[in-house]
Every structure is written in structure tokens, then in C-alpha cells.
Amino acid sequence: MEKRIAVIRESPVELCKILKFENIAGSGGEAKCMIADGRVKVNGEVEIRKRKKILPGDIIQVGDIQIEIRGI
């Protein structure tokens, strides 16, 4: 599993934006489709809300990529 750390300057951040900024999805639209299809987990639970508010300490998983969210 590939583990990454994403640092956010402001919180909360929408889930779809993090997927886009971390290059998991090529566009916001692709990120929203990935979420709607149930391919994204937040803190171990499948998340289907595209605008789910992500905070420092959250862990996002897409396939074999895991992203830990940290604040400044």
C-alpha cells in the first residue's frame, strides 16, 4: 500500500478537492464519480458524499493509496 501525507492549510476541505489535488483523480468530475461509485473510504468507511468535510487526522483510502491528512 502506498502511504501519503497531505498537509492542508485550511480546514475543512471537501473530499473531492483532496482527490484532485493529490492527483488521485484527473479532475473534479472524475473525483466525484469515484466517490459516487463507492471507491473511496474515509476513516475506514465507504464515503459517498462528494463534499464530505475532511479534517486533519482523517485518513482517505482509494484502492491501494492511503492519504493521511495533517494540518499546519
Image: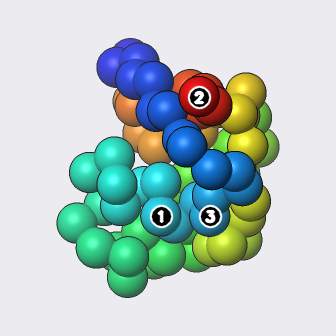
Q: Describe the colour scheme in one phrase.
A: rainbow
Q: If you read the primary sequence from the N terminus, does the residue marked by circle 2 or circle 1 appear first?
A: 1
The residue tagged 1 is: 17
For residue 48, side relative to residue 28 (left or right):
right
Q: Position of residue 9 (x, y in %)?
A: 55, 43
Amino acid of disc 3: Glu
For residue 61, side relative to residue 3 (left or right):
right
3D distance between C-alphas at marks 2 and 1: 18 Å
The residue tagged 2 is: 72
Question: Element type at marker 2?
Answer: loop
Question: Element type at marker 3?
Answer: strand
Cβ–Cβ under 8 Å for marks 3 and 1: yes
3D distance between C-alphas at marks 3 and 1: 5 Å
Amino acid of disc 1: Lys
Cβ–Cβ under 8 Å for marks 2 and 1: no
The residue tagged 3 is: 14
Image quarter of residue 21: bottom left
Q: Which quarter of the image is occupied by the C terminus?
A: top right
Numbered disc in front, either 2 or 3: 2
Residue in front for this viewpoint, 9 or 26: 9
Numbered disc in front, either 2 or 1: 2
Depicted 67 relative to depicted 63: above or below: above
3D distance between C-alphas at marks 2 and 3: 17 Å
Residue 67 in view here: no
